[in-house]
Image (cartoon, rainbow, N blue to C red):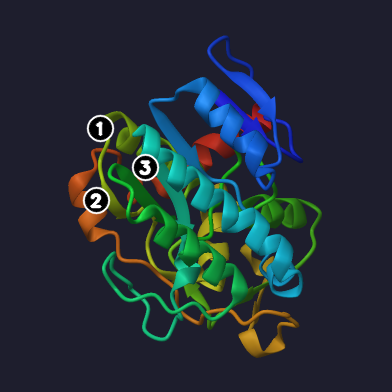
Amino acid sequence: MVGLHRTNPIPIENERLRKISLDVSQLNELRKVIIKEKSDVVIHMAALGDIDLCEKDRESAWKTNVKPSMEIAFIASKIGFFTIYLSTDYIFDGEKGNYREDDSPNPVNYYGLTKLMGEIAFSPCPSCAIVRASSIYGFGPGRTNFAKYLVEKLKAKEPVKALIDQYTSPTQATLLGKAIIEIAERKMEGVFHIVGERMSRYEFAIKITETLDLDKSLIQTAEMKEMKWLAKRPRDSSLNSERSRSLLKTDFYHRAFETLKEEYLRREQI
């Protein structure tokens, strides 16, 4: 396996893993690596994920989120390797929630638009899968997510505000990885929603504190109108995963918080 990274080094050591530092917006370098490695599968997860920064710096968002996707899709169509593209619930406008794989997208911010353009780039590929996730969380390696942030704040006895009127279907990171591996190994084509149950941000925060036996009295309610966001957010971008659950063997839905607790306890023992 070859792992590409840019800002954050990959904190995993394995004799079968080779790491390459690369800026995916440098398309010539990206092309050289993909063609040289002759991979059976390319999993494309690189993106500028800061919603407000994407809104503010649209040029960087396009260069990072769209152009590399177009390049990888083009190479895949020529060489024929299997590709997996990691997308997002933010391709939907959030007006109804519980979106299925074949519902029509309608992003309300530029980040969502760039991710949708990535999906469009891969859609003609003869052998590919699009995996949509939502509010990815966990204690594995990688950048800060809501679970990590919440635990850090609560351990410092600091209150945390969580929205009661914004709904998602949070994705446990480790189980997302296992689902992606299964899709890669079985070369399953199509669109997959790898998410957990629908809940508000507040319900999500409470569920985490209950699972990890933390002080939930520090969780405070807030509303979307209080947020000083630059980019608009969808109100209910929750995804329906019934079809994906019926096709995959990986239980990414029922075991989400159990897996989170296992990760948390391992982390506490270190």
Q: Split into 4 quadrants, where in the image is the C terminus? A: top right
Residue at image mark 1: 186
Q: Which is more toward the observer, 38 or 255?
A: 38
User: Which image quadrant is residue 127 in?
Assistant: top left
Q: Which residue lies furthest to the bottom in this view?
A: 225
Residue at image mark 2: 245
| Residue type at tag 1 | Arg
Q: In this view, does 42 lie to the left or right of 32?
A: left
Element on which disc 3 rests = helix
Residue at image mark 3: 77
**Does the image show residue 48?**
no
Give the vertical position of 217 relative to 23 (above or below).
below
Q: Residue at x 49, y 77 (%)?
A: 107
Q: Which is more toward the observer, 123 or 268?
A: 123
| Residue type at tag 3 | Ser
Check disc 1: other Cα within 10 Å, few if <14, some if 14-19, many if 20+.
few
Q: Which residue is drawn at 53% across and 12% down?
A: 16
Check disc 3: other Cα within 10 Å, few if <14, some if 14-19, many if 20+.
some
Element on which disc 2 rests = helix
Element on which disc 1 rests = helix
Labelled pair 3, 1 in contact (Cβ < 8 Å): no
Labelled pair 2, 3 in contact (Cβ < 8 Å): no
Give the image location of residue 180, x and y in percent: 39, 39
How far apart are labels 2 and 3 at the CA level?
28 Å
Give the image location of residue 146, x and y in percent: 63, 57
Q: Is residue 171 left or right of residue 53?
A: left
How far apart are labels 1 and 2 at the CA level?
15 Å
Of mark 1 and mark 2, the one earlier in the sequence is 1
Mark 2 vs mark 3: give the one in front: 3
